[in-house]
Image (spheres, helix red, strand yellow):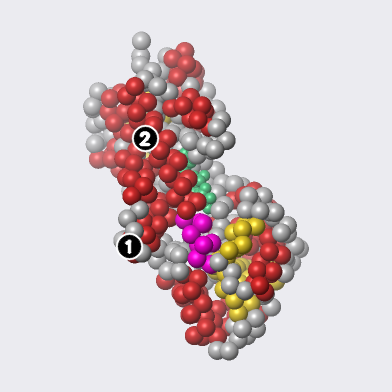
Amino acid sequence: MNICVVGTGYVGLVSGVCFSELGNHVTCVDVDEQKIAKLTEGKSPIYEPGIEDLIQKNLHKNRLLFTTDLKQAMESAQIVIIAVGTPRKQNGEADLTYIEKVAESIGQHLKSYKVIITKSTVPVGTGKIVKEIIRRHAGEVEFDVASNPEFLREGSAIYDTLNMERAVIGVESEKAAELLIGLHKPLTSNIVLTNIETAEMIKYASNAFLATKISFINEIANVCELLGADVTKVAEGMGYDKRIGHAFLQAGIGYGGSCFPKDTSALVAIAEKAGYDFRIVKDVEQVNKEQRSKVIDKLKVALKNELYGKRIAVLGLAFKPNTDDMRDAPSVDVIPILQNEGAEVVAYDPVANENAQKVIPNLEIADTMQEAIINSDAIMILTDWKEFKEIDLTEVSKLVKQKIIIDGRNIFSNEHMEQMGFYYASIGRKTVSFN
Ligand code: UDX
């Protein structure tokens, strides 16, 4: 199949690369000339395990192309995928400016039948808007619109796409359904065929549900702390029930990233517009917001309320491991609070250091984990990178000024920390104090 993907952000790039890997001819379009030049050289603008190898392989096989020329990219395409950003507006709604602009350009360049898919996460009803805009500019040319939301996770985006658990296809015609089922058949046998509005809702409902699971276990964690229970064991015990499952029950500092915060507030806004007060999701957001301050409270307890002049080593800046993405990362909220209280923060992340410096003012970055830890009064873990889980605690003991670890991700066991003689405060578990 010939496919044109508009937008080379996370979703667009990963989808385009994976569809080319399946043998399709894919042209990815973006207005950003520098990005396109980089991609044409085989370099990925995002940090995502495995993506560069696939870009280079498929460029070499001549079935993946990058261009700024939408008209040319659309010419031979049967399918056009819209994958541009839908940032959050101040009122929580998704901003559709980019989607609308792209729909207009697609309409202007449409010369033969194509299925135009919206892959960006868009409010229910956007498919109809996209259709109207294209119709206004395309004259009599026949086309179909469709919704095909993306469920990939950053850090395992290639795997998630090539091994997708389901494909959600929202269409209005048999012709579009056939084409899109054909495209997704090599990827999954779970194809959910429905109308456009339902497909759009499936994406929001899925992300809001996962966010709810996280805020739920975080609230359980907060109660565990008051009662002396251990949230990791509670989650383990709950997860064996197949109806609950183990996934997304890891208590911690709260969710971040480009999707959950944006999609939960968009869902609340969509519901409100339709006249419904979505209480659960509103509370999920509030719990998530408050969860971020837990590590600060714990640090204050450990340092007897005195952060001024204290050297704090922050390990982990990205919103989760295996990505350099800083969008809605807990570190963006936590670090400035520590700095305002007069703490000297030295941070380290295996890949997100450069991006973090763009969003956290006056951030001191260490070149290595050891350099961040030296002479620290406390270590604070904000991202559960594998590198941190494997840290040599004997070496840490020698480097730090005080053996205090505040862990927002529960990466160590209390028993081990007790053996190693650390003060260790984590989420939803007893604090290990100095003897
Ligand atoms: C998410 C969805 O998983 C994906 O399907 C959707 O397409 C986009 O949004 P992503 O944002 O890449 O993907 O990350 P994910 O791995 O889902 O984690 C989101 C956040 O939740 C992270 O901040 C993570 O640290 C946090 N999280 C996740 C928890 O705090 N506890 C958990 O148990 C799981």
**For the stretch drawn in magenta, what is the main secondary structure?**
helix
| Label 2 within 8 A of ligand 1 by Cβ | no
* Residue 284 image position (x, y, % from top left): 37, 45
Which quarter of the figure has residue 5? Answer: bottom right
- Above or below, comparing residue 21 to residue 414 in the picture: below
Q: Is residue 42 left or right of residue 311?
A: right
Q: In this view, does 341 lie to the left or right of 149?
A: left
Residue at x 34% of width, y 58% of height: 276
Frontmost residue, 83 versus 417: 83
Q: Name the residue under label 1.
A: 275
Q: How crowded is mark 2: few (under 14 residues within 10 Å), some or many (20 or more)?
A: some
Q: Is residue 82 left or right of residue 357?
A: right
Nearest to viewer (mark 2 / mark 1): 1
Classify the position of the C terminus by image quarter. top left
Q: Is mark 2 on a helix, strand or loop?
A: helix
Q: For residue 200: magenta?
A: yes
Q: What residue type is labelled 2?
A: Glu
* Residue 387 image position (x, y, % from top left): 54, 33
Give the residues in magenta: 196-204
* Residue 91 image position (x, y, % from top left): 31, 61
Q: Is residue 346 left or right of residue 7?
A: left
Q: Mark 2 points at which residue?
A: 219
**Disc 2 to disc 1, C-alpha distance:** 28 Å
Frontmost residue, 338 versus 292: 292
